[in-house]
Amino acid sequence: MLKIVVALLLCSGMAFGQLKQVTIEFVKDGETVNVSDESFNVYVVTIGQELKTVFKPTLSGKNFLMPDLCGVAKGHLLIAYDGEVYDFGYHNLNFDQNMRLKIGLDKRPYDKEYYLKEAEPKEVRAIAYVEFYPLENGKGKVTTKSIKDFKAYLLASKDLIE
């Protein structure tokens, strides 16, 4: 049976590693969302064989602090906004430096050219994307996720944080 734990600032009795500052921007259908809105929350979900951890960082303006995830490098990055939950995929979230993230959800017609490869099939209804920008060194990257059934996508996203 899978156990769900809401992550606090402790990991196996030890304090989390060094915190990294993450600046976030959320764009929904071409419109930038005010991430300071009370209905806006960020979640990081890691799932092991017997343990599911839900981490909900506190936003300060457009920023939050991302801890070391206790040796877990990958997890789901989710946004809850205006009554809906959006999953932006399974990523390496054990950041080794401060980051800027531009996260978006785009329905047809798509705003960005790099979505077109993901969106070629006619059954794709939306694209969820994350643009990762390291602030100290290295190159950024973009990940995309095709959404074919939007209702099923929203239900699966909500299930990740429950």
Image: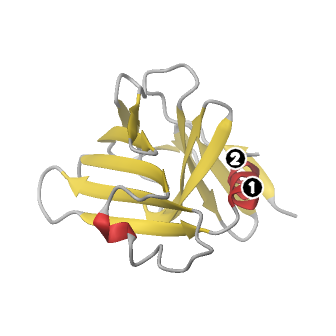
Crowding at dot 2, Cα within 10 Å, few <14 / some 14-19 / many 20+, comes out as many
The location of residue 133, given as percent across then percent down, is: 23, 54
**Residue 89 sits above or below residue 15 on the image:** below
Quadrant of the image containing the C terminus: top right
Would you say 52 lies left or right of 115 here?
right
The image quadrant that residue 34 belongs to is: top left
**Residue 58 sits above or below residue 7 on the image:** above
How far is the residue under mark 1 from the one under mark 2?
A: 16 Å
Q: Nearer the viewer, mark 1 or mark 2?
A: 1
| Mark 2 lies on residue | 161
Q: In front: 138, or 2?
A: 138
Quadrant of the image containing the N terminus: bottom right
State if disc 2 and disc 1 touch (CB < 8 Å): no
How many labels were placed on the picture? 2
Would you say 121 lies left or right of 93 here?
right
Is tag 1's residue or tag 2's residue first in the polypeptide sequence?
Answer: 1
Whether residue 43 is visible, yes or no, is yes
Whether residue 72 is visible, yes or no, is no
Crowding at dot 1, Cα within 10 Å, few <14 / some 14-19 / many 20+, comes out as few
Going by the numbered disc 1, the residue's amino acid type is Lys
The residue shown at (68%, 32%) is: 83
Q: Secondary structure at mark 1?
A: helix
The residue shown at (27%, 46%) is: 100
The location of residue 139, given as percent across then percent down, is: 16, 66
**Residue 94 sits above or below residue 25 on the image:** below
Going by the numbered disc 2, the residue's amino acid type is Ile
The image quadrant that residue 51 belongs to is: bottom right
The location of residue 143, given as percent across then percent down, is: 39, 67
The residue shown at (64%, 44%) is: 85
Q: In front: 102, or 4?
A: 102
| Mark 1 lies on residue | 151
